[in-house]
Image (spheres, helix red, strand yellow):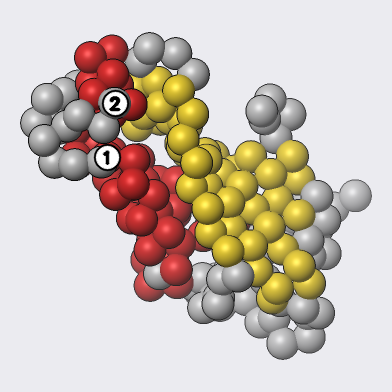
Amino acid sequence: MSSPQFTHFDETGASRMVDVTDKPVTRRTARASALVRMQPETLRQVRQRALAKGDVLEVARLAGIMAAKRTFELIPLCHVLVLDSVTIDFEFSDEQHLRIVAEAKVEAKTGVEMEAMTAAAVAALTVYDMCKAVDRSMVIASIQLEEKSGGRSGLFRREDAK
């Protein structure tokens, strides 16, 4: 089996947008996550929606959805996709960690992995922005693809995915 080739470069090494003209439209989904570590008191305030700037989770949810819709403007060579659905969910895994899970869905000729990852990343950055006045030591980590389906490569599921 040959190793996969980088598809965003032509035979001379020049950058290119992948030509999806002949690819079939299929149902494609991607789920990505990001982890924000913060002080327990900060996370308590986030959970109780008690921060002065407002409801951190709802603002982060909106930011993530908006970012997914604009991924093509942020990541060079991404295709413009008219997304069918973007969801952002939050999990409190312990007293210091907020896990953000973003899912994007589309019927298209190309996948939505970058849209899901962008949504998770921007939602995490928004949490940081809204909480930095009380906790500048927050850390954003583990922005990663958890699962994707559809297209020629089919299903991918991270082995350690929840």
Query: Taking 86 as reference, is 73 left or right?
Result: left
Q: Is residue 95 above or below residue 69?
A: above
Q: CA distance from mark 2 to mark 1?
A: 10 Å
Q: Which residue is mark 1?
A: 56
**Element marked by disc 1:** helix
Left or right of 143 on screen, residue 36: left
| Residue in the picture at 48% in, 47% down | 88
Q: Any mark on residue 40, and which? A: none
Q: Nearer the viewer, mark 2 or mark 1?
A: 2
Q: Quadrant of the C terminus?
A: top right
The percent coordinates of residue 137 (x first, y second) are 19, 21
Question: Which picture quadrant has residue 131?
Answer: top left
Q: Quadrant of residue 70?
A: bottom left
- The local crowd at label 2, few if under 14, some if 14 to 19, many if 20 or more residues have their Cα within 10 Å, is few
Left or right: 159 in relation to 57: right
Q: Residue 157 in the image: x percent, y percent? A: 74, 39
The amino acid marked with disc number 2 is Gln
Secondary structure at badge 2 equals loop
Circles 2 and 1 in contact, beta carbons < 8 Å = no
Q: Identify which residue is drawn at 64% across, 53% down.
A: 30
**Residue shown at the point (38%, 63%) measured from the top left:** 66
Q: Residue at x 51, y 71 (%)?
A: 78
Locate residue 77 relative to residue 30 in the image: left or right.
left
Q: Which residue is mark 2?
A: 48
Q: Is residue 125 visible?
A: no
Tell me which label, 2 or 1, sits earlier in the chain.
2
Picture layout, residue 39 above or below residue 141: above
On the question of residue 52 being in view, the answer is yes
Which x, y percent locates residue 42?
Answer: 23, 21
